[in-house]
């Protein structure tokens, strides 16, 4: 989930260079074997799908807060744009820097696995959050909500907003985003089983880029003139779709829902473009991921089912099947409650 910018090769080279400098700086200012945490290596680096993304800015800030609480060393690095193998070089560099843990939102289920396995062999703990890798190539996955729960809340919202009848489309992130694809598959099943009068016309991909998502929204509305609703299970996509519709003749006629953050969606809720949308608190997600990394570094848990650990102010969490820790259920935001939140 996600917000991108930037161009291709030169931007990638520049970002890699900047990442190397940042990591070198971290190593010289506390990212050593102690990582600022006494005898434990609490040098923990967050590696989101891409930088410059409001969602990951919030999640990683939650991680930074947690790491400060247990006196570790926080860093964040990442590619300018999300791509299947864009995170591999960062994982390799972090392994060479001997960080204590990498907290990763995976751009691809399999592409980073070889690099992750090398990191684990070097003693680096690897925690995924938001978007998982294959089960065998990380220590833990911090799941923001169950895939079933996310898919169901999105279908329920669009069904309510279009009176359970009409044509809809899905505006997703990248075509290979593992979390997005899992949710979309479940949405399709829910629609087929429980909403026979809703027709899913198309699934399109905005690549977690604001302008691309904006353009894809325009194209959907031109291609499907009877469209009544758009589900966007990505924070970039839902904001771009709402921005397009808010100043068009489709406002009030085409519903927009999905997953978004309160701050980015507040104006669209208040002007009537969006009735309701859902999300979890990404700050809590990053906070929980950081404490999970600490527990792995401490040896309090290994990632096996039944392990439990304390996550600061969030309380105690238990490791479930396949090394998964669940944050909680999605929350619906609307005009009645959106002013209570600031992220």
Image (spheres, grey):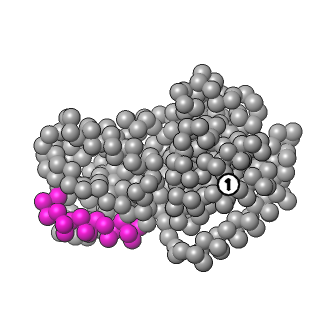
Q: Residue 312 location, x and y as percent? A: 65, 34
Residue at 45%, 37% (x, y): give it. Answer: 145
From the image, tell me which residue sits under label 1. 91
Q: Report the magenta residues as a range.
A: 210-227
Q: Give the image quarter of residue 252.
A: bottom left
Which of 163 and 318 lies nearest the eye of the viewer?
A: 318
Is 234 inside the magenta-drawn segment? no
Mark 1 residue crowding within 10 angstroms, few (<14) / some (14–19) / many (20+): many
On the question of residue 262 being in view, the answer is no
- The furthest residue to the top: 306
Residue at 78%, 55% (x, y): give it. Answer: 96
Q: Residue 275 location, x and y as percent? A: 27, 51
- SS for dot 1: helix
Which of 253 and 120 lies nearest the eye of the viewer?
A: 120
Q: Residue 175 location, x and y as percent? A: 40, 57
Q: Give the image quarter of residue 303.
A: top right
Residue at 60%, 58% (x, y): give it. Answer: 87
Residue at 71%, 56% (x, y): give it. Answer: 92
């Amino acid at each position: 989930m996600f917000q991108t910018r930037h161009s291709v090769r030169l931007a990638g080279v520049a970002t890699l260079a900047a990442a190397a400098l940042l990591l070198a700086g971290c190593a010289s200012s506390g990212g050593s074997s102690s990582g600022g945490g006494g005898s434990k290596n609490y040098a923990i680096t967050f590696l989101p799908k891409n930088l410059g993304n409001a969602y990951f800015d919030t999640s990683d800030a939650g991680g930074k807060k947690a790491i400060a609480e247990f006196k570790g060393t926080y860093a964040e690095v990442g590619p300018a744009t999300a791509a299947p193998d864009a995170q591999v070089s960062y994982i390799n560099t972090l392994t060479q820097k001997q960080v204590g843990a990498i907290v990763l939102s995976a751009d691809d289920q399999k592409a980073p696995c070889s690099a992750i396995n090398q990191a684990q062999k070097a003693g680096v703990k690897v925690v995924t959050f938001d978007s998982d890798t294959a089960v065998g190539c990380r220590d833990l996955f911090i799941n923001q909500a169950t895939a079933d729960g996310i898919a169901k809340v999105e279908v329920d919202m669009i069904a309510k907003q279009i009176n359970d009848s009409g044509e809809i489309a899905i505006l997703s992130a990248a075509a290979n985003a593992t979390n997005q694809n899992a949710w979309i598959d479940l949405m399709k099943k829910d629609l087929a089983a429980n909403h026979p009068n809703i027709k899913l016309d198309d699934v399109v991909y905005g690549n977690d880029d604001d302008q691309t998502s904006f353009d894809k929204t325009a194209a959907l509305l031109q291609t499907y003139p009877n469209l009544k609703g758009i589900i966007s299970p990505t924070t970039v996509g839902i904001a771009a779709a709402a921005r397009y519709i808010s100043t068009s003749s489709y406002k009030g006629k085409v519903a927009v829902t999905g997953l978004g953050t309160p701050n980015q969606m507040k104006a669209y809720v208040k002007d009537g473009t969006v009735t309701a949308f859902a999300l979890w608190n990404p700050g809590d997600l990053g906070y929980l991921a950081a404490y999970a990394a600490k527990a792995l570094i401490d040896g309090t848990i290994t990632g096996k089912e039944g392990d439990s650990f304390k996550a600061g102010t969030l309380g105690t969490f238990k490791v479930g099947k396949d090394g998964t820790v669940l944050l909680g259920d999605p929350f619906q935001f609307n005009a009645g409650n959106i002013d209570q939140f600031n992220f």
